[in-house]
Image (spheres, helix red, strand yellow):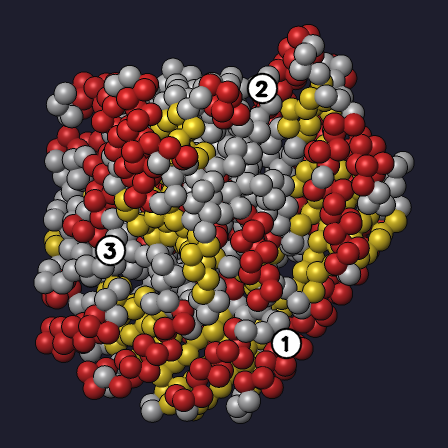
């Protein structure tokens, strides 16, 4: 089928207003939130904006008949290239499937469409004393469907868990164009934990059309403490000591001096400009508990060398302290035209040594690197500042990135804590996983998408063909054991 | 029953699985050996039944074949424990007691409870997705699982996840194997994030509560500023007993327990931390088949808001007059159990219960009845997708064939 015939068919399913196909309109869909030094951009044949699950199924059936790739997309805020159409084909953007269908406070659940914006759901239920716990920094823009695809985290997942801990069931369209319900609708489901497999599958095995999510009761009291240290070492030690004391704060964030330099002049959150690092510690729960825990944390921080401890319980004060953290990335524009945001995770006790290594890499590659991150769970976000028009700087960023990722893996860390693999980190997968590990992951892909039509060229290393790998491996085993007739 | 985790030999006890005679026992001592025995089973067309502590062999349907019993008994090492990082890597055959004991030495733990922790293994708890009342406040092992290594029928061992507390590198095979009853591969080791042990706890106990008072008590417990770790209601003759567990800091648990006792507006007693702990471990121990061949246990899943209504209906069933019954109103299930399982009466019970709650699974029932009943019931969604997974990971159907949902 030619492109024109395809567009016509798509328009028949969706109406002309929901099919984007002109070259200029498509340009905005060539990207996601990733830095373009780290991923390649690509243009789909068409972007469709369905309004119902049935339309999604019809599009997938059409693509499947025509052998066209499908790339699911939410708000396009992803940071690993996950929603870029590497092989062209059709992008299904869920942004017009944005209704909150049901809210059931008795069972603490909500049924939502995938295009609902993360923060909109929380805003909707906050008056009744609930919130949706996953809170990625992009929560003002990102969709719940995207959160599900990437298994997104956020500052508060230290206490409340990541997206997968808050998804109870999903309606999905599988690559063969069929609609399914997987998981529960408030009650527990039996059988394989399919919704657990779907969360974090980066759009490789189908597309979500509805989600049953858990609503979390809002705590009675919230307190945020800002503590400042002369260097990142003592701040890191304070993190270790807080965790070792058996305290699980709601959030435990660190920002280094370079970050403070960008943030404080922009947002006036009250971070001391001369601090080597600040910690934002949020605790929540019943008021007596919060008071006792706050006191204990303040004592630990002072012992670890904190110069000052400032506590905020009023919402406006707390919001101001958080504003600096939440807007930190935006503030980086004050320091450089481009940035590359990393997402590695290291064991919590290795924070100090990893930050020292980040400093060394910054010097070796002559690149400013700012640190603002989820210290409580060891999830680092080193942010490399550069100018993407400067080819030499781009090369240095890529070199420094490789060095950083390798170091984190060597000390037992992970490639990504909450941003996903996508295209950005696919070639690093072999640093962490063996051929056999990847083959097991390929099993999931092959089980649900044997034609490999969903989100091609993501997650697996370049050139890796899931079906082929499984077949080759089975052939080798057939020889070894005399089984699996080919 | 022997309870020593070193001397205990679960696999040697296994003579049959749900009434199907079990064949030879193999006890591999490395992950590679597990994979090798699976590949051999494929070559020979044998059915393999993976066994941990053998404490919950009652879960699942009768297997089509049980030629090989694969025991994880020799895979019992704690591989990595980093108290400061609060991460743990442990082989599948380590017992829950062994793991909790190691963690407790450093004031940490995993908030997971099963009957018979001295025998139940980590691999078994993962494969069966078992949990206790504390799930209300703390979740299940699913929520703490950060990495896994699994032996597959193709003779390989595949890992996923890692040993850090947050990780989205690649597909989530951890959750695929959690609750899969070893039908997609045999878990050989698993990594967890662990938690600080609660500094203190209290339990508020209510006896002889009128059934009609239960909804108000539920609201008092669940819609409240305090967080409840566990909340169970048990049938007690014509009335009910209620147990509410609160854990956390010393001062908080004390004052919240007192406050809650006031809120429920019923005569109550408050258990101190030691009494509270022992109350809950004996509570969980009631769900142990032990050596009782007539033990049976049904779990009925509904939405949390429906669970008290279902509990009240079940309490009225004459067939269940002598059965023990517990509701978890915050979680949405009712457990029914007894030790008088005979074919006729249990048949009737199951029919009646499933008429009220289609999503009722049999967790345990006498072996003699197993071949005639689908313990999972027929209210499972998307079995066809599950079949696709099974076909991919175990195409020759050697792993627990026929024991899982939909004949998988």
How many other residues sit within 10 Å of disc 3, few (<14), some (14-19) or many (≥20)?
some
Label 2 belongs to which residue? Answer: A36
Label 3 belongs to which residue? Answer: B380
Any mark on residue B256, and which?
Answer: 1
Q: Residue furthest top?
A: A392
Mark 1 vs mark 3, CA separation in Å? 40 Å
User: Which residue is located at x 67 percent, y 60 percent?
Assistant: A284
The count of marks equals: 3
User: Which residue is located at x 60 percent, y 86 percent?
Assistant: B262
Respond whether the residues carrying marks 1 and 2 are from the same subunit: no
User: Which residue is located at x 72 percent, y 39 percent?
Assistant: A327
State which mark lies toward you, 1 or 3.
Answer: 3
Proximity of marks 1 and 3: CB atoms separated by less than 8 Å: no
Chain holding disc 3: B
Q: Foreground residue, B167 or B400?
A: B167
Residue A438 in view of the camera? no
State which mark lies toward you, 1 or 2.
Answer: 2
Q: Foreground residue, A86 or B243?
A: A86
Relative to A272, residue A482 above or below? above
Mark 3 vs mark 2, CA separation in Å? 44 Å
User: Which residue is located at x 33 percent, y 31 percent?
Assistant: A11
């Amino acid at each position: 089928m030619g492109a024109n015939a395809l567009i016509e068919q798509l328009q028949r399913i969706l109406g002309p207003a929901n099919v984007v196909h002109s070259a200029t309109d498509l340009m905005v869909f060539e990207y996601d939130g990733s830095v373009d030094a780290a991923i390649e951009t690509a243009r789909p044949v068409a972007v469709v904006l369905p309004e119902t699950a049935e339309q999604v199924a019809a599009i997938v059936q059409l693509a499947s008949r025509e052998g066209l790739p499908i790339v699911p997309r939410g708000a396009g805020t992803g940071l690993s290239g996950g929603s870029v159409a590497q092989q062209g084909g059709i992008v299904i953007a869920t942004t017009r499937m944005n209704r909150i269908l049901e809210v059931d406070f008795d069972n603490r659940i909500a049924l939502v469409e995938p295009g609902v914006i993360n923060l909109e759901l929380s805003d909707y239920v906050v008056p009744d004393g609930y919130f949706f716990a996953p809170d990625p920094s992009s929560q003002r823009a990102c969709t719940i469907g995207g959160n599900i695809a990437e298994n997104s985290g956020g500052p508060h997942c230290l206490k409340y868990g990541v997206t997968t801990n808050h998804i109870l069931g999903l309606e999905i369209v599988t690559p063969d164009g069929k609609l399914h319900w997987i998981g529960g609708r408030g009650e527990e489901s039996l059988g394989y934990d399919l919704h657990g497999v779907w969360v974090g599958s980066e759009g490789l095995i189908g597309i979500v059309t509805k989600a049953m999510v858990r609503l979390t009761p809002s705590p009675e009291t919230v307190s945020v403490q800002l503590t400042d240290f002369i260097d990142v070492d003592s701040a890191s030690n304070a993190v270790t000591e807080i965790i070792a004391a058996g305290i699980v704060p709601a959030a435990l964030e660190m920002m280094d001096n370079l970050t403070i330099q960008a943030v404080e002049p922009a947002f006036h959150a009250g971070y001391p400009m001369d601090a080597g690092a600040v910690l934002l510690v949020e605790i929540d729960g019943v008021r007596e508990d919060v008071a006792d825990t706050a006191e204990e944390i303040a004592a630990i921080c002072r012992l670890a060398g904190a110069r000052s401890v400032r506590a905020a319980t009023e919402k406006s004060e707390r919001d101001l302290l958080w504003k600096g953290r939440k807007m930190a990335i935006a503030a980086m524009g004050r320091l450089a035209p481009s940035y590359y945001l990393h997402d590695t995770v290291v064991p919590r006790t290795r924070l100090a040594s990893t930050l020292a290594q980040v400093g060394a890499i910054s010097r070796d590659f002559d690149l400013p690197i700012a640190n603002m991150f989820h210290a409580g769970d060891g999830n680092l976000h080193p942010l490399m500042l550069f100018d993407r028009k400067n080819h030499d700087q781009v090369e240095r960023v890529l070199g420094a990135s490789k060095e950083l990722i390798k170091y984190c893996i060597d000390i037992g860390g992970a490639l990504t804590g909450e941003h996903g693999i996508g295209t950005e980190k696919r070639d690093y997968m072999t640093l962490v996983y063996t051929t056999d590990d990847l083959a097991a992951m390929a099993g999931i892909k092959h089980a649900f998408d044997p034609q490999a039509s969903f989100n091609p060229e993501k997650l697996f290393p370049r050139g890796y063909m899931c079906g082929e790998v499984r077949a080759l491996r089975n052939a080798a085993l057939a020889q070894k054991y005399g089984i699996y007739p080919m | 029953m022997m309870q020593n985790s070193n001397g205990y030999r679960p696999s040697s006890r296994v003579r049959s699985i749900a009434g199907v005679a079990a064949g030879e026992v193999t006890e591999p001592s490395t992950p590679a050996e597990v994979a090798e025995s699976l590949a051999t089973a494929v070559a020979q067309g044998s059915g393999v039944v993976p066994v941990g502590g053998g404490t919950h062999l009652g879960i699942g349907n009768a297997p089509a074949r049980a030629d090989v019993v694969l025991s994880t008994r020799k895979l019992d090492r704690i591989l990595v424990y980093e108290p400061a990082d609060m991460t743990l890597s442990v082989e599948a055959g380590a017992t829950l007691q062994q793991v909790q004991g190691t963690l407790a030495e450093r004031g940490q733990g995993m908030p997971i409870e099963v009957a018979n922790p001295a025998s139940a293994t980590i691999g078994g708890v993962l494969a069966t997705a078992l949990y206790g009342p504390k799930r209300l406040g703390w979740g299940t092992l699913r929520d703490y699982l950060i990495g896994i290594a699994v032996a597959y029928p193709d003779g390989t061992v595949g890992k996923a996840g890692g040993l850090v507390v947050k990780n989205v590198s690649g597909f989530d095979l951890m959750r695929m194997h959690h609750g899969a009853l070893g039908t997609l591969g045999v878990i050989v080791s698993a990594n967890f994030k662990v938690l600080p042990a609660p500094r203190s706890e209290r339990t508020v106990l209510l006896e002889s509560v009128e059934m009609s008072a239960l909804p108000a008590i539920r609201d008092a417990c669940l819609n409240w500023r305090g967080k409840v770790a566990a909340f169970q209601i048990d049938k007690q003759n014509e009335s009910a007993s209620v147990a509410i567990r609160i854990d956390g800091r010393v001062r908080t648990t004390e004052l919240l327990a007192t406050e809650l006792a006031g809120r429920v507006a019923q005569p109550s007693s408050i258990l101190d931390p030691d009494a509270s702990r022992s109350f809950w471990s004996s509570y969980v121990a009631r769900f142990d088949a032990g050596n009782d061949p007539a033990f049976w246990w049904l779990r009925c899943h509904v939405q949390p808001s429906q669970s008290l209504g279902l509990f009240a209906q079940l309490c009225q069933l004459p067939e269940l007059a002598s059965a023990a019954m517990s509701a978890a109103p915050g979680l949405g299930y009712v457990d029914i159990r007894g030790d008088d399982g005979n074919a006729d009466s249990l048949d009737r019970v199951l029919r009646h219960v499933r008429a009220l709650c289609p999503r009722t699974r049999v967790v345990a029932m006498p072996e003699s009845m197993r071949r005639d009943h689908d313990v999972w019931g027929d209210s499972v969604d998307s079995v066809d997708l599950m079949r696709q997974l099974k076909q991919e990971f175990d195409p020759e159907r050697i792993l627990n064939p026929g024991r899982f949902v939909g004949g998988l």
